[in-house]
Amino acid sequence: MTSSISSIFAQFARNGARPPEGDSISDLPPQLPWLVEHPVNAEGIEGESLRFYSFFSDKIRTLHCPMARGKCLIGPSHGYLYACKRWKDPTPSLFNPLTKDEVTIELRRDHFPFLHLESMGPDPIGTDNYMAFTDARHMMGFYRPCSCEWNYVELPIEICPLPGSCLKRRYYMNDPETGDTVVIDIACGSSFVIPAPKTLESSDRVYFVESTGKILRIVKHKDETLSLDLSLALCTSNFSFDIYQLCAEDDICRSRWVKINSIGNQIVFLDDHNGISVTVHPSTGIRINCVYFLQRCFVSCCGDWVNYFEVYKYSFSDGRTEKVVCPFSNGRTWLVPNLVTSVPAGHQ
């Protein structure tokens, strides 16, 4: 499967983002994510080309993307990346590096003098779900690309907006002080708390990932005692994961997290802030029930600490973590390649 699909994508890239003649893209099976290289300077992306790496075909692809120049790219997602300028007045958009489709996000400057993306969701263009934004105050804006609709929620002063996940008109995020899950009703602005199933350590990271229509709470543990010296290579035994699924009650405020030991035929891909989940058919021979994650690392250079990213894979089947060989040291997020043009009607 992988080799034939790779040839179609390679031919597609050579044809300048036009589907290759004689090939049907509608019959392509679900794709596995590519790692997106993010070669940034002080202003954003350098140059007009982007490189992507597939761990499953072991191929690097280069695409000409002039719209990415000078911008920061945020994922992970299916098909589209979020692009915005770093220091200047942002003109954010969603763009597909393969088809060159670009969807501008209509901003309300009276509500958002400063804009920061917290969650774009796994498929912002192909679904009616919301993207989550914050500003310098305790305000969140939820934007639905399919209808260009904004919903604004002013948070209580004790709630700090953080990366999370939107699903079915609710936004889930972690309270770093308690480990509890704060759930915001996007429609009415109310919020409630789901207690943490287990006390978190200071080094734990919490991700909320939509998977087959459900919300997963994924906790990454890191044993800091094994890597006190930042100049030492990270030990794979540092990392482990716990995963929880939301058990919803008729009274949503009584919902609780239930620990699970397997995610079945899913693979989760995490970057430094968010994650996506994809379904893999067992016949592909690809290892399922695991997490690929990016780990920020540091190295001393000329008296300064320089950060880069390494890729690891954790298996829920045997609890083992292994480092994954990668040609990029600055891969920052994941993109599921998508050749289908699906610009929302409101943007046409």
Image (tube, rainbow, N blue to C red):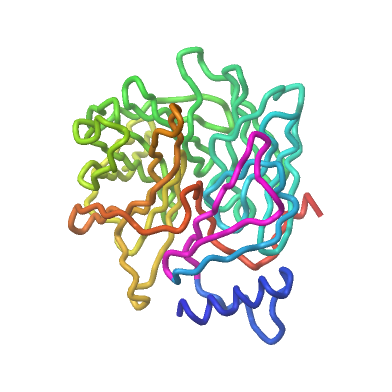
Quadrant in which the C terminus is drawn: bottom right
- State yes or no: residue 260 in magenta: no
Q: Which quarter of the figure has residue 256? A: top left
Compared with 259, 127 (above or below) is below
Q: Which quarter of the figure has residue 45? A: top right
Whole-percent x, y for residue 55 in the image: 42, 64
- Residue furthest to the right in view is 348
Compared with 115, 50 (above or below) is below
Q: Nearer the viewer, residue 180 or 340?
A: 340
In the shown orientation, is residue 50 left or right of residue 91? Answer: left
Whole-percent x, y for residue 40 in the image: 61, 42
Whole-percent x, y for residue 184 in the image: 49, 29
Residues shaded magenta: 30-56
x 29%, y 43%: residue: 233
Compared with 348, 119 (above or below) is above
In the shown orientation, is residue 173 left or right of residue 238? Answer: right
In the shown orientation, is residue 161 left or right of residue 63? Answer: left
x 68%, y 39%: residue: 84
Quadrant in which the N terminus is drawn: bottom left
Q: Main secondary structure of the magenta part?
A: loop
Q: Nearer the viewer, residue 17 or 69?
A: 69
- Residue furthest to the front in view is 302
- State yes or no: residue 40 in magenta: yes
Whole-percent x, y for residue 162 in the image: 48, 28
